[in-house]
Amino acid sequence: MTALNPSGTLRIGAADLEYRMIGPTPADAPTIVMLHEGLGSAALWGDFPDRLQQATGAGVFVYSRAGYGASSPAALPRPLDYMSIEALEILPDLLDKIGFRRGLLLGHSDGASIAAIYAGGAADHRVRGVVMIAPHFIVEDMGIAAIADTRKAYETAGLKPKLARWHSNVDNTFYGWSDAWLDPKFRNWDISEYLAYIRVPVAILQDADDQYGTIRQIEIAGEECYCPVDVTIIPGAGHSPHRDAPETTLHLITEFAERILYFHEGSAGRAA
């Protein structure tokens, strides 16, 4: 276990990963571990982790995966099973290093897929619930088309300098993500098998007009999961409800976290 400062880096495998630890450490309270999107980073969550910590009283741990933010660059090309590698090889080491004892995984987009793989593949009793924001379990044609459009915007329409504010090696970030998704072999990517093995409550938040995934993603969760699944459609939230509908998203996650993390402890446990 590593002593956690409010911010710093963790050596996980061959990479140095930047992180923030907000609020109490895992030794003192439940921890919400946040897993960012395919073009995200610790900083790109904005103030949402801080607001979530204040609302729940839990510690909130955010980090940038290799290839993102100020973390070490990733080796390219990324393998097409990169999300499984993150979930089953990197994340277990990270949770152990921070002294994770109990809490939630909260993932957005790619991060939600990583959370689903871990929850279904690792059987970690410390994980008491999973929040998935705009998850994807299979590849859809409309999602691939949206990624192709995002690539055009990166190369010709000014997206690159915007992303460069958040990533030290922005080409490594962008092409590591887009090259994998746009590889024809990636069309066969399917992680739905992990959903049947999740044994903790799941909350899914999505907009019906998410440009990267349809309601089919939620239907798959309903078909495959044996665990309780709470689904909320948030109109006007796009692919990033925590940015485009932050108040609703914060309320929903807070209610889920308090129900899952503090149900058996009452107000005394919440204060602790």
Image (cartoon, helix red, strand yellow):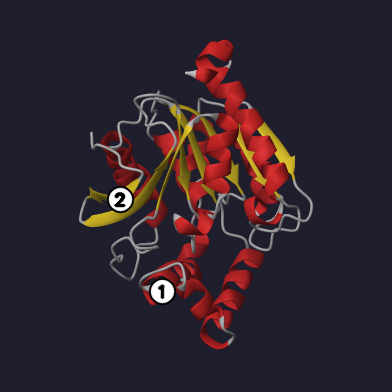
Query: Is residue 178 rendered to the left or right of residue 248?
Result: left
Extreme-bottom residue of the structure: 156
On the image, the x and y values in percent for residue 259 come to 61, 22
On the image, the x and y values in percent for residue 141 come to 63, 66
Q: Which mark is residue 155?
A: none
Query: Is residue 128 rendered to the left or right of residue 74?
Result: right
Residue 126 or 253: which is nearer the viewer? Answer: 253
Q: Is residue 225 above or below residue 204?
A: above
Amino acid bearing label 2: Gly
Q: In which quarter of the image is residue 153?
A: bottom right
Identify the secondary structure beneath mark 1: helix
Q: Is residue 83 above or below residue 34?
A: below
Amino acid bearing label 1: Val
Mark 1 packing: few (<14 Cα in 10 Å), some, or many (20+)?
A: many
Q: In which quarter of the image is residue 202?
A: top right
Counting residues from the start of the chain, the first of labels 1 and 2 encountered is 2
Residue 63 or 88: which is nearer the viewer? Answer: 63
On the image, the x and y values in percent for residue 132 come to 58, 43
Query: Is residue 66 rendered to the left or right of residue 209?
Result: left
Q: Residue 170 carries which label?
A: 1
Q: Mark 2 points at which residue?
A: 8
Query: Is residue 17 visible from the viewing direction of this image?
Result: yes
On the image, the x and y values in percent for residue 25 come to 37, 32
Extreme-left residue of the structure: 14
Mark 2 packing: few (<14 Cα in 10 Å), some, or many (20+)?
A: few
